[in-house]
Image (cartoon, rainbow, N blue to C red):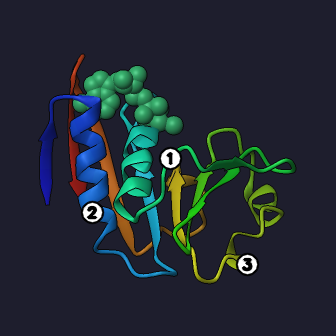
Amino acid sequence: MKYLSKSPEETRRIGAKFSRTLKSGSWVGLYGDLGAGKTTFVQGMALGIGINPRNYVSSPTFTMVNLYEGNGRTLVHVDLYRVKNAEEIETLGLNDYEDAVMVIEWAEKLKKPPEIQVRLKTVSEMEREVEVI
Ligand code: ADP
Ligand code: MG
């Protein structure tokens, strides 16, 4: 499915609608350059599964892994931008979050791509193509 978003709000709405289709335990890989709207999309996902994005918990240990928690659900938001190698990813313990929805920015750094992939592209200053694969 492909969308053309014309604002950050619209990207959040697309993320919200998308997240309602996900089961606990799903892994979602996000792809796209800096500024393509990956984090904006994640904020929408949190809203979609009923979590107030204000309930954003920064992990004290790993700044690459942060949680959105609330309404009995957890969205684990991973940003691999600064990760250097596969060993470093191992230390994050991503497989330990059994019932959460996992969403991973810069998912190309994972050994194998998650079953669900979302590709974001900058089209113009305010336009982003959002493709769910
Ligand atoms: P990424 O995580 O991919 O680096 P962010 O979501 O952090 O990207 O940032 C996207 C930036 O682009 C924000 O500053 C946002 O306001 C801006 N922007 C402009 N138009 C859009 C759009 N249609 N969708 C998402 N973000 C947009
Ligand atoms: Mg980001």
- Which badge, 3 or 2, comes first in the chain's sequence? 2
Q: Quadrant of the N terminus?
A: bottom left
Q: CA distance from mark 1 to mark 2?
A: 16 Å
Residue 43 position within the rendered picture, expressed as x and y whole percent measured from the top left: 43, 46
**View extreme (right): residue:** 61
Q: Which residue is mark 1?
A: 53
Q: Nearer the viewer, residue 72 or 123?
A: 72
For the residue marked with disc 2, what is the amino acid? Phe
Residue 25 position within the rendered picture, expressed as x and y whole percent measured from the top left: 52, 81
Q: Quadrant of the C terminus?
A: bottom left
- Dot 3 and dot 2 residues touching (CB under 8 Å): no
Determine the secondary structure under disc 3: helix
Q: Which residue is mark 3?
A: 96
Q: Which residue is mark 2?
A: 18
Which image quadrant shows ligand 1? top left
Label 1 vs label 2, nearer the camera: 1
Q: Nearer the viewer, residue 23 or 132?
A: 23
Number of other residues with Cα within 10 Å of mark 2, as a class: few under 14, some 14 to 19, many 20 or more: some
Label 1 vs label 3, nearer the camera: 1
| Residue at (69, 50) in percent of width and height | 57
**View extreme (top): residue:** 125
